[in-house]
Image (cartoon, rainbow, N blue to C red):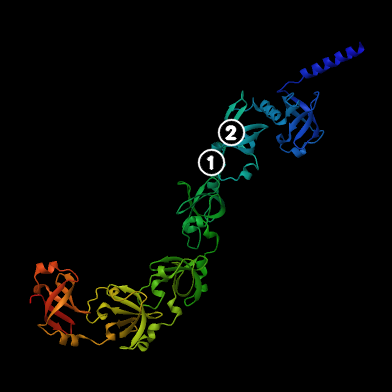
């Protein structure tokens, strides 16, 4: 009988104990143990409950004997375990604490605890709120910096029944920037150094955020050296120190300088680079008229095309140099005020034209290489720095040469006769036909007036028809000496019977007629 009474009392006590706990209830508890994943908490129930260690910001601080409030999630799960939640208890306590004291539009302080899809989760007095990415104003701020310190937020939307809190940082940032802008405008001075962040890059410069006021760092004020684009010097999000060059508060304009932080290399240019100095430099830009060479950091000189070689013919720098190439040059002129330095390569060599008349005697024969052409002749390199020219009229005794490439090729080795040398004018006249005797006296004997021959048509022109009597011997059928209709029908390589009516040895011409 006693045993039955005792059993009945225990069942009654057990039943009353179960009724005192309900899911969703917040109760105090004590940590009585830890596993690698969970804290074991005693809340006075028939069995201990379990809280995931992931719910604690610093799980290593949770130890046996630690007291805390927990929320009963499940009195008995599928495994028969009592499931508790510390995080949900904190959120619910937080909501109870702030629900009646905050409203939409209020400014709160919170800390970003994690980044989620579409935004951030912010801890505000123990309550988790959502900060949409579009309202965060965290652009260009590293993730580590976002979670490293607390920020101020505006309550954008609040649903107390659903315990839903949405925040915005954009309005706070705008107000802070407006306040900072007013302070900053009052502090700005010309020549002042300021730290800023690159917020935009264009072809002409970069926009720098000085902390509420944006300034323009123009490409010409970025470096003492030549640069092609601002991205060579700065990058988005980069922090850098700049100098205030000028500002206009009424128009919200600030001009900034970066190169002005370092000394102007042109200040000491006269002492460092007097005329006659030989230096090595790097090719930084190539133009049709010359080459820009950087001889020191921020100092460039122009190697004009006329100062590259002693050749009279203007060279093409774009065919001779490449960007980045190291060259040796001589300083020939310095203008510090205009920031200009004139350079020369040819001054490093002896002027070959001073001895040209002595070295290349008139009527002598010399070897050369065809280097280029003009409509009126071919240029022949005789030695480095010395070029001569063969006029088209000096290429053949008998043939009418319309263009030098009909006779010669670029790079071809040729023997030529020296016709004239002008050292002061840097001019050498060469001849190709002068290598052989003048054939015209013999041609005059071979083709006396009234001679009739079969010729081959070369070309038609307005003033007659050019024909070939034999290899390299050409003649002109005057337009008055041939029927117009017959002339119009003629094509190159056609046969035409002609009669010699004129031979001019001095002018090296033969006139013929088709009227036989």
At horizontal 64% and vertical 39% (from top left) the residue drawn is: 150
Residue 481 visible here: yes
**Relative side of 12 to 516, left or right:** right
Quadrant (top left/top right/bottom left/bottom right) for the C terminus: bottom left
Residue 192 visible here: no
Query: In the rendering, at what x and y percent does residue 134 appear?
Result: 54, 37
Query: In the rendering, at what x and y percent does residue 354 appear?
Result: 38, 85
Query: In the rendering, at what x and y percent does residue 318 appear?
Result: 41, 67
At horizontal 19% and vertical 82% (from top left) the residue drawn is: 508
Q: Is residue 375 above or below residue 167?
A: below
Residue 178 tag number: 1
Residue 167 tag number: 2
Say which of marks 2 and 1 sits in front: 2
Q: Is residue 468 above or below residue 74?
A: below
Structural crowding at the residue carrying mark 2, measured as other residues with C-alpha within 10 Å and reported as few (<14), some (14–19) or many (≥20): many
Dots 2, 1 in contact, CB < 8 A = no
């Amino acid at each position: 009988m006693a045993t039955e009474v005792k059993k009945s009392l225990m069942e009654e006590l057990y039943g009353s104990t179960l009724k005192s706990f309900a899911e969703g209830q917040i109760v105090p508890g004590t940590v009585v143990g830890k596993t690698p994943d969970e804290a074991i908490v005693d809340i006075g129930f028939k069995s201990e409950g379990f809280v995931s260690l992931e719910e604690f910001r610093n799980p290593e601080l949770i130890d046996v004997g630690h007291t805390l409030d927990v929320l009963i999630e499940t009195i008995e799960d599928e495994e028969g375990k009592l499931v508790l939640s510390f995080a949900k208890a904190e959120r619910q306590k937080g909501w109870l604490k702030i629900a009646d004291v905050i409203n939409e539009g209020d400014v709160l302080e919170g800390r970003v605890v994690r980044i989620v899809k579409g935004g951030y989760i912010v801890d505000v007095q123990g309550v988790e709120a959502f900060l949409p990415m579009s309202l965060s104003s965290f652009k260009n701020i590293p993730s580590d910096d976002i979670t490293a310190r607390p920020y101020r937020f505006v309550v954008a939307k609040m649903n107390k029944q659903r315990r839903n809190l949405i925040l915005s940082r954009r309005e706070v940032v705008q107000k802070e920037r407006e306040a900072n802008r007013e302070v900053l405008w009052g502090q700005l001075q010309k020549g002042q150094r300021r730290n800023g962040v690159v917020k935009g890059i264009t072809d002409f410069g970069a926009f720098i955020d000085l902390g509420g006021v944006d300034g323009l760092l123009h490409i010409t004020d970025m470096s003492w050296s030549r640069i092609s684009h601002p991205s060579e010097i700065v990058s988005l999000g980069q922090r850098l120190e700049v100098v205030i060059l000028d500002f206009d508060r009424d128009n919200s304009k600030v001009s900034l300088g970066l190169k002005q932080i370092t000394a102007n290399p042109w200040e000491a240019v006269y002492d460092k680079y007097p005329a006659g100095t030989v230096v090595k430099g790097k090719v930084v830009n190539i133009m049709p008229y010359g080459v820009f060479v950087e001889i020191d950091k921020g100092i460039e000189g122009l190697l004009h095309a006329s100062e590259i070689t002693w050749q009279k013919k203007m060279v093409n720098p774009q065919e001779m140099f490449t960007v980045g190439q190291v060259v040796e040059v001589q300083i020939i002129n310095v203008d510090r005020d205009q920031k200009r330095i004139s350079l020369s390569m040819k001054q490093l060599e002896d002027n070959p034209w001073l001895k040209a008349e002595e070295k290349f005697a008139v009527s002598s024969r010399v070897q050369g290489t065809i280097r280029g052409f003009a409509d009126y002749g071919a240029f022949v390199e005789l030695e480095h720095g010395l070029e001569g020219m063969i006029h088209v009229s000096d290429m053949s005794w008998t043939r009418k040469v319309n263009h030098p490439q009909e006779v010669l090729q670029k790079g071809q080795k040729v023997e030529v006769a020296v016709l004239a040398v002008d050292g002061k004018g840097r001019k050498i006249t060469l001849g190709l036909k002068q290598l052989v005797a003048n054939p015209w006296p013999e041609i005059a004997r071979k083709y006396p007036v009234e001679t009739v021959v079969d010729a081959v048509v070369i070309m038609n022109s307005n003033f007659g028809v050019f024909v070939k009597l034999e290899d390299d011997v050409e003649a002109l059928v005057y337009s008055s000496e041939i029927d117009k209709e017959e002339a119009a029908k003629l094509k190159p390589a056609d046969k035409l019977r002609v009669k010699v009516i004129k031979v001019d040895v001095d002018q090296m011409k033969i006139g013929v007629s088709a009227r036989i």
